[in-house]
Image (tube, rainbow, N blue to C red):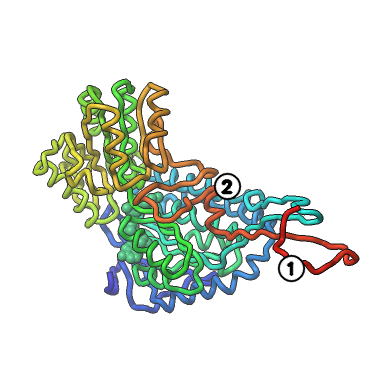
Amino acid sequence: MTETVDAPTATRIPHWIGGRRIDGGSGRRGPVFNPATGVQTGAVDFASAEEVDAAVQAAREAFPAWRHTSLAKRAELFFRIRELLHARREEMAEILTREHGKVLSDALGEVTRGLEVVEHCCGIPTLLKGEHSEQASTGIDVYSIRQPLGVVAGITPFNFPAMVPMWMWAPAIACGNCFVLKPSEKDPSASLWVAELLQEAGLPDGVFNVVMGDRVAVDALLEHPDVAAISFVGSTPVARAVYEKATASGKRCQALGGAKNHMIVLPDADVNAAADAAISAGYGSAGERCMAVSMVVAVGDVAQPLVDAIRERIPKVKVGDGMDPSSEMGPLVTAEHRDRVASYVESAPGEGATVVVDGREGVPEQGFFLNPSLLDDVTPEMKAYVDEIFGPVLGVTRVATYEEAVRLVNESPYGNGVAIFTRDGGAARQFQFDVQAGMVGINVPIPVPVAYYSFGGWKSSLFGDLHVYGPESIGFYTRGKVVTSRWPDPATSQIDLGFPQTR
Ligand code: NAD
């Protein structure tokens, strides 16, 4: 979007640099909508490379003092951030619902999962502890320390406008870095709200900055010589390109991409529990989750009862404005995205799939709504199987054996989340051993790890080595240093040109 957007209903959404709201000067802005009404509510500034540079410079200037801030003070600050976020979580959830469309209870769930990452960072003194070996050689001690990288940046997707940035800024800042966030241009207000909250909690100006925008801002961050590391979450093609560009310019990078998550249902599974899980994980947040279940793989004769059980439940899902507490599923984020998702239902019969429930029927006229759809007899060469649809379209693939089901998952180019539903502990254990994915659920459809583990997929769902939040994020946002130390007795000091040996 490159044109200036001037809807009378639109509030301007500026950058946050050096502790202040800064109106963009590039003349480029993008529209932000309330997806439940279709009305434009915001006009977000798109940063130029110069504006990105100003944010990086603000972060750079804040870094020396922030790096010197003691672990005790950093932990204390994180407790204050946690308290403020917790006290105002409903306010934040409303911002998410108004711009993303997800229902309030789901928005609150997003804030809560993000808060868990902030809570984990309250333990930063423990998380940053190094190791110490006394008397590694005679009179010599060796110890390891971890130090921050400097200025680091995060680039985030539209589907979790609060939680995914928290995955990044919380550990990055706790580790002593200064941060520049480039949130999604589709729902940017949560980031500005967080910036003001962090300031209220006492975070020094410049430690957290937000540049709004599109590819221009992303490229400026990827090319900036003072940005040491990039965390990215978004679609696979962009994740791959970001990873290649960032690493080519010498930056550390973790780039999480898209997904196509399978839920395998074995013949011995509880059909009702599996159908409930498929509904929750397939249609929650209108399917706009990177951990959403999009393919149910039904093994053997569980297929028909399972399809029947899912179909029976679909009409009971209450679709509506996320601000209405009785709504269970909201609209999609934009009209374009809604139309793209609907196109998979349109093309499915032509490819040989069966449309069991057509979500294009009975949608409200206003807003970007699409009801839940269910496709049966989906096979691996169909578009509805191959593509990440990222909407409320659940596909069912019927296979004869467990081995066939696992092969399907392992041949997928993605490897984010996967789940198995069974009553057989041995089969579940075999599955966790066999399956190629980063996050595995056993009778749990959305296995997002708790904050003290790390989140990340395999294959085209993650470019880079380290997962986000949890222990791996501490490794990502710091560099290791090992100190070998001796306090010699001057009386015994001597010259020795030999290679140091441990004795
Ligand atoms: P997206 O890739 O379109 O955008 C992500 C970010 O990249 C945004 O900030 C956007 O402004 C920027 N961007 C978009 N196109 C770009 C380009 N050509 N060059 C540089 N930057 C660009 O993703 P989205 O539509 O906002 O989010 C949905 C996607 O994110 C889905 O594919 C979903 O699976 C994925 N996702 C993955 C995870 C995960 O943990 N693996 C989590 C959430 C979302």
Which quadrant of the structure image shows residue 435?
A: top left
**Residue 97 visible in image:** no
What residue is drawn where x is 71% and y is 61%?
500
Q: Nearer the viewer, residue 353 or 311?
A: 353
Q: Which residue is mark 2?
A: 120
Query: Neighbour class for label 1 at 10 Å: few (<14), some, many (≥20)?
Result: few
Q: Nearer the viewer, mark 1 or mark 2?
A: 1
Spatial CA distance of label 1 from label 2 is: 47 Å
| Residue shown at 43% from the left, 74% from the top | 23
Q: Amino acid at mark 1?
A: Leu
Q: In the figure, 267 relative to 251: above or below?
A: above
Q: The residue under label 2 is which amino acid type? A: His
Q: Nearer the viewer, residue 78 or 420?
A: 420
Q: Residues within 10 Å of mark 2 (few under 14, many from 20)?
A: some
Q: Residue furthest left?
A: 350
Decide if residue 81 is on the left or right side of residue 329. right
Left or right of 305? Residue 239 is: right
- Would you say 136 lies left or right of 275 here? right
Question: Which image quadrant shows ligand 1?
Answer: bottom left
Residue 497, numbered label: 1
- The local secondary structure at tag 1 comes to loop
Residue 61 in sight in this render: yes
Residue 155 spot, x, y in % from top left? 42, 61
Across and down, in percent, residue 113 comes to 48, 45
Q: Quadrant of residue 183?
A: bottom left
